[in-house]
C-alpha cells in the first residue's frame, strides 16, 4: 500500500487508491461509456494496468472494483480477480432480504460478544496486575 505522491492534487470526487496506487474518481463523475469503449478498443485484457495508465494520463477513472464491474457487465474480456472473500449475492426477495438481515445481525452480535469477552478478559488481567502491584507497594512500605 502506498501513500499518495507529494504534489498530487485531487479534484472534487477524487481520492487516492492506496491499494492500487492511482487517483480514482467517484464512478458517477466518470464517463462510463467512453471508458468502456476506450478499454474495448485498446485490445488489452488486463483491466488494472489499463485503469492505472488512464489515471496517470489524467483521465477520470473509477475505483478498480467499479471499473471491473462495468467491464463485466459489458462482457469485456478481463482477467479474473481471485477473491479472498465469498462472492456477494444480492438478495432479491423479501424472504432473502430478511434472511440476509438476520445473518448480518447475527454476525454483528457475534462480533460484539467477542469484543465484550476480550474486554472482560483484559479487565480481569488488569485487576490481577493491580492487586499484585498494590501488594508489592504495601511490601515496600
Image (cartoon, helix red, strand yellow):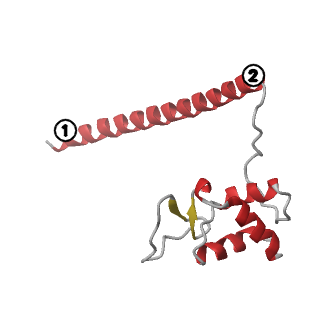
What residue lies at 60% left-to-right and 30% top-to-bottom? Answer: 110
Of the 4 image quadrants, the one containing the C terminus is: top left
Q: Are marks 2 and 1 in contact (CB under 8 Å)?
A: no
Which quadrant of the view contains residue 130? Answer: top left
Residue 29 in percent (x, y) is at: 58, 57
Of the 4 image quadrants, the one containing the N terminus is: bottom right
Residue tagged 2: 94
Of residue 114 and residue 37, the one placed in the foreground of this image is: 37
Residue 137 in percent (x, y) is at: 20, 42
Q: Is residue 57 left or right of residue 95?
A: left
Cα distance in 3D space between marks 2 and 1: 65 Å
Look at the numbered disc 1 and give the secondary structure of its residue: helix
Look at the numbered disc 2 and give the secondary structure of its residue: helix
Of residue 1 and residue 46, the one placed in the foreground of this image is: 46
Residue 121 in percent (x, y) is at: 46, 35
**7 lies above or below 71:** below
Label 2 packing within 10 angstroms: few (<14), some (14-19), many (20+): few
The numbered mark, 2 or 1, whose residue comes first in the sequence reads 2
**89 lies above or below 96:** below
What residue lies at 77% left-to-right and 70% top-to-bottom? Answer: 39
Which quadrant of the view contains residue 37? Answer: bottom right
**69 lies above or below 133:** below
**Which numbered disc covers residue 138?**
1
Of residue 24 and residue 12, the one placed in the foreground of this image is: 12
Residue 59 in percent (x, y) is at: 61, 71
What residue lies at 62% left-to-right and 68% top-to-bottom? Answer: 20
Q: Is residue 38 left or right of residue 5?
A: right
Amino acid at each position: 500500500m502506498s501513500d499518495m505522491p507529494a504534489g498530487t492534487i485531487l479534484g472534487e470526487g477524487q481520492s487516492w487508491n492506496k491499494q492500487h496506487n492511482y487517483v480514482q474518481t467517484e464512478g458517477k463523475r466518470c464517463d462510463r461509456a467512453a471508458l468502456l469503449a476506450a478499454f474495448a478498443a485498446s485490445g488489452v485484457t488486463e483491466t488494472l494496468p489499463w485503469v492505472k495508465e488512464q489515471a496517470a494520463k489524467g483521465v477520470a477513472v473509477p475505483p478498480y472494483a467499479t471499473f471491473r464491474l462495468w467491464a463485466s457487465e459489458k462482457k469485456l474480456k478481463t482477467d479474473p480477480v481471485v477473491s479472498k472473500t465469498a462472492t456477494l449475492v444480492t438478495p432479491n426477495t423479501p424472504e432473502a432480504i430478511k434472511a440476509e438481515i438476520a445473518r448480518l445481525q447475527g454476525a454483528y452480535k457475534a462480533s460484539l460478544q467477542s469484543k465484550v469477552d476480550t474486554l472482560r478478559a483484559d479487565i480481569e488481567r488488569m485487576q490481577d496486575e493491580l492487586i499484585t502491584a498494590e501488594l508489592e507497594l504495601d511490601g515496600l512500605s
